[in-house]
Every structure is written in structure tokens, then in C-alpha cells.
Image (cartoon, rainbow, N blue to C red):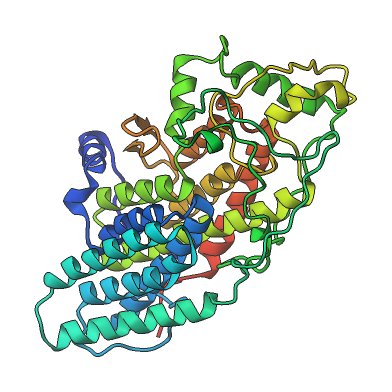
Amino acid sequence: MQGLSRRPAKLTGSVLALSVLAGMMPQAAADEVFDWNVAGFEATATGGQNPIVMSRTMAMLHLAVHDALNAIDRRYEPYLYEGRAEPAAAPPAAIAAAARDVLVGVIPAWGKPEQRAKAMTMVDNAFAAALAKVPDGVGKTAGITVGQKAAAAMLAARNTDGSSAPAQFVPGTGPAQWRPHPNPVPANPPIADPEFAVGNWPALLPQWGQVTPFMMATPWQFRLPGPPALTSAQYARDYEEVKKLGGKTSAARTAEQSEIARYWYEGSPQGWSRITRIVGAQHGLDRWDNARLLALVNAVIADGYIAGADTRYLYKFWRPVTAIRAADTDGNDATAADSTWETYLNTPPLPDYPSTHSVASGAASAVLARFFDGDDDVAFTMTSGPPFGGITRSFKSFSQASRENAESRIYAGIHFRSACTDGIKLGEQIGRRAFAQYLQRYRQ
């Protein structure tokens, strides 16, 4: 199996303890690739991109950064851009130019005008700050040039990828069919606009299942078999579990389970990129390996959202809050309706099956384990970001984190278990294929 150019040593005993502490402070070992990962997420969030759209933007950014670096020193196969940089090209300038140009090319397509303006200012400021650290001269100029070329190749390739296609979806009204659903009252997390706080939003990005994947062959390459039949025992078990553990006033959900629901509520692209930065810092990876790892992780997460949309808008399965309130229509004697039941956390306006949170976690964890020479047992500690920032949890492996991420959606009341377990399986298939086929070690 192809791994790192510098194989990381196993972390044991006191070394592991020190590494975990270092993982809590990734900025100490961060490089320009990390810096632009953080800046990219800040800009896309400010620009009004939701996690689905953000996943595409960040995959584009990191693949372009990977290609720019490998045009300077070809350690790994490029994704798109095959050119070669001037020998003196400065890597920090190449990274900054590639990231900046992708963001500037994508930000204008999403969000409100005032959001886009703020995001563009953030990107310009980050770019200026990054270039100020690079000495003027031929190296800086050559670095900027190759970064721009890598970004241009990426923007051209994604210009007609289907992400801007018109959204067309008609919600259902019958048993098992998805329809707009309410948020708990008050909304959790809070939503300032009272019009939006109640929920009942139209389906989000139903066209996303037709977006061209980054590393899958087609959006339906690993299409799932579908949710359990309404009259099945499996559906009844899934139903009873989420009804019991995911309700707003659940007495069965423990304090830790509530914490887990909040901890993982952040979007998958942000959370799993933060994990990647933490683990990359623990292992002392260089720019090229950080670029490759973040490119792979963000690309498979983006593909996870694409594959998830393909499956979820095929089956159009209802969310727990709809199912529990309308259980008297499902034909299953083992399910009892509760017309007043509310979720613990807000339910995103998408069909239930599969949980794309779970797809993303399965894909990212599969890549991370394979990147570190097939070692899943890499310990790390991470602190959550918004909307429930400041929660710190520790994990012994990538797969443990992936499973907890999936479980969180049940505790939040927003997914059935089958959507989560099948979602992880879908993601793992995406991650395994991507790692085996893309960004391989370069062999002359």
C-alpha cells in the first residue's frame, strides 16, 4: 500500500500523550496548507455556503493546492494540472495563489451580495498576508504563476459540473414520503430570524445528486439498497430508538449522548478537516503530505454529499419527526404515533436516507486510516466548532469517531439508525476507492 513519503512512527506511551496534547494545538505545527484550510472555511461560511456547497469548494481548493505543489516538486500524481513550475517557485506563494483563485472563482455563485462581499474581503486579506511572508523575487512570482494555473484548471473543469442546475423536487404527502418538517420550539441551535426558526423549509439542493463527482465514477456508483420497509421489524426498531433517544424532552438520552449530538452537529467538511489538521500536526507532515491528505479527505466528503443526494432523492424517505407524528399511517402495528413529538436539534431540510453526516465520516475515516499505512488506531483530541463550539472529546481511532458521528444523528432526533449505518458503509466505499486510485506516489 502506498503511504507517506515519510512514514510516521507508531505513537505509544508518553510519546502518544504528548502527541495528543499537540493535537489540541495544531497551530503550533501548522503550515500554509493548514492556514488556507482554515481561511477557506471561514470565507465560505461567511459567504453563505452551506456544508454541501462548502464541500465542493473546499475539495476544489485543496486539489488545486495539491497540484500546485506537485508542479514544483512532483512527489504525487496530479489531479488535473499536469504542468511544471519554474525550479525556483516558492511553495507558500503557490499554495496561496491556488487557494485564493479557487475561492475568488467560486464565492460569487453563492450567498447574498453582502455575504459575498465580506467573504471576498477575507480572502483578499488572507492572500495579502500570505504573500507578505514570501520574499519578493523570481521565486514568489513563479509560485504565484503555478498556483494560478492549477486553480484555473480546477475552475474550468468544474464550471459545468451540474452544481448550478435548477432545483426541481416535489415533496410527498403519503407514508414514508419526505415533506417539509418543523424544528423544535424554540429552534435548537437558535435561529435569529423567526420566519426561518420554525423550519418547514423546502428540500435543499435536490439537484446535487447529478453533480459530477471528484473521485467516484458516477454519483450512483455505490448506490444503497434503500431504507427498511415501513412494515418491517427493522423499521420499528429504528423508529422506537430515535423516538426514545432523540426527542426534545427525552428522559432516556444521557447527558453524554446530548453532548455527542451537539459536538458533531457542525458540518462534516469543517469537523473532519479539523481532525485532519490535528492528526497531520501530530505526525509532523510536510506541505506535500498535508496537501495530499486534505485533498483526499475533502474530495471524498464532497463525493459523499453527491452520492448521498443521489440516494436520498431517489428514495425520498421521511424524517423521524414526520414519521413519528404520522405513525398511524405507516401500516406498522409496532409504531405508536405522537403528534406533539419534537426533535432535540433542528432537522436539516433533506430526506432521511442516507445520513450524509455518516457518509462523510465513513469516507474521511477510511482515507485517514489508509493514509497512515492502514493504521486506524490513531488517537486524537478535538474541540468542536460552531454552533456548539468548545466541546472537547477524545478518540482512540478514526472509526470510533466515525461511529460516534453517526450515532449523534440519532441522539439529535434527526435520523433513523439505518440511515446512519448504511451511510457509513457508503462513505467507506467512496474513501477506499479514492485512496486506491488518486494522488498516488509519483513514479518516474
Q: Nearer the viewer, residue 192 or 166?
A: 192
Taking 39 as reference, is 430 left or right?
Answer: right
Residue shown at 38% from the left, 76% from the top: 67
Would you identify the image quadrant in which residue 23 lies? top left
Q: In the rendering, at what x and y percent does residue 439 appear? A: 45, 71
Up/down of 51 relative to 69, above or below: above
Taking 288 as reference, is 15 left or right?
Answer: left
Up/down of 286 relative to 335, above or below: below
Q: Nearer the viewer, residue 442 or 79?
A: 79
Up/down of 100 relative to 404, above or below: below
Residue shown at 72% from the left, 60% from the top: 220
Would you identify the image quadrant in which residue 250 lies? top right
Q: In the rendering, at what x and y percent does residue 145 appear? A: 28, 86
Would you identify the image quadrant in which residue 389 lies? top left
| Quadrant into which the C terminus falls | bottom left
Taking 311 as reference, is 396 left or right?
Answer: left
Extreme residue in the right direction: 331
Q: In the rendering, at what x and y percent does residue 290 appear? A: 32, 61
Taking 311 as reference, is 295 left or right?
Answer: left
Residue shown at 63% from the left, 55% from the top: 205
Is residue 74 in view from this perspective? Answer: no
Residue shown at 31% from the left, 32% from the top: 390
Q: In the rendering, at what x and y percent does residue 117 appear? A: 34, 63
